[in-house]
Amino acid sequence: MIYDLIVVGGGPAGTSAAITAVRNGARVLILERGIFPRHKVCGEFVSAESLDLLARLLLSQQSRLLQEAVRIAGARFYIDGRVLHTTIIPPAASIARLDLDAALWDSAQHDGVDTRQRITVQGVVGMGPFRVITTSGDFETRALVNASGRWSNLSPRPATNGRRTEKWLGLKAHFVENAPQASVDLYFFEGGYCGVQPVNPGTQSAGQENTRQQRVNASAMVRADVASTLPQVFACHPALHERSRKWQPLSDPVSTSPLTFLNPEPVRNGILMAGDAVAFVDPFVGDGISLALRSGRLAAECLVPFFRGVMPLPEAARAYSAFYRQRLAPVFRTSSRIRRMMGLPPLLRKPLLSVLEKTPSVTEYLVRKTR
């Protein structure tokens, strides 16, 4: 069979692209090297701008996943001994990736996507049509979407040219906490930060008592020379250290590295990129899942005229690149500015934090600009 579309990667970006394409009459195959369900390093924050899209992608019988999701209506930033408060309007949802990925995968299967797990893509031949070389043989397709994440055989690591670069890594685990607030709390320290928020119980805590409102996700981004485990991360911030002393582990920790910030590249060699394959956005803005869902849908929508024979593939790819840079790339620019501000020396950062503390509307504005 020659597919209309092969999607590499079965996370939110990949399934969003696959479901959108198959609902527009395309023959679609997803190739996923892992197996579901699984934990992934993720803040598990789904901004309100993508909740309607997520509801449309999921099956009606999966609506409980959204209905039971913890709603996050506020954020607290712990930095330099200050606590900055801001509201999140409209509220976001907190959904465990373990459950979100599995639900989207099931929706793709139900809608007619050919879904295959434990298959690693080894290479691609052509620029449309494509021959995808995998550990389970070759597959032919008219179009290709790479949603395989930051690094894969389709997303090579950038060359360092012999220069030493800082190594950043991501860490995450779930814990039990008594009555956490419905807030995303970000603890900043020299060399990284850690986000904590309540998350819906899902399958991981099935059979555990009284965990519905007590499960929290702790997800950190940290320099490798500062910390390599979550307990080491917690020790980097006094308030976080004190809070974490009362936690009980609910899942094994997972990690990922390296984390590298690059300029968005929506199309590469005729392949449409989606999710983290385009570029890695600063996790503290809490829009990674939203960008994944939206970019996957956008890629598929731009390919629909190609599937129907009214537009050549290069033109569809150019349209996707233009729409991505117009609609989604501004998030990367805003997050980069905030990262530079947070990375200033404490003496230079102090007046900026003072302004944010005294004028919550400015903080709310910055939050809105990352959506």
Image (spheres, grey):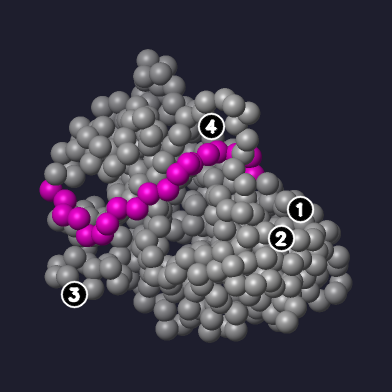
- Image-based side of 100 in relation to 24, left or right: left
Q: Residues within 10 Å of mark 4 (few under 14, many from 20)?
A: few
Q: CA distance from mark 4 to mark 3?
A: 44 Å
**Nearest to viewer (mark 2 / mark 4):** 2
Amino acid type, mark 3: Gly
> On the rendered image, what quadrant is the N terminus found in?
bottom right
| Main SS of residues in magenta | loop
Q: Residues within 10 Å of mark 3 (few under 14, many from 20)?
A: few
Q: Which residues are magenta?
A: 246-264
Residue 328 shows up from this direction:
no
Task: Find residue 364 and report its horizontal and vertical position in percent.
Answer: 44, 41
Q: CA distance from mark 1 to mark 3?
A: 48 Å
Instruction: Give me the disc on residue 207.
Output: 3
Taking the spot 24% from the left edge, 68% from the top edge, the residue there is 205
- Image-based side of 272 in relation to 99, left or right: right
Q: Which residue is mark 2?
A: 124
- Nearest the camera: 210 or 362? 210
**Nearest to viewer (mark 1 / mark 3):** 1
Report helix, strand or loop for mark 4: helix
Residue contact between numbered discs 2 and 1, judged by CB atoms under 8 Å: yes
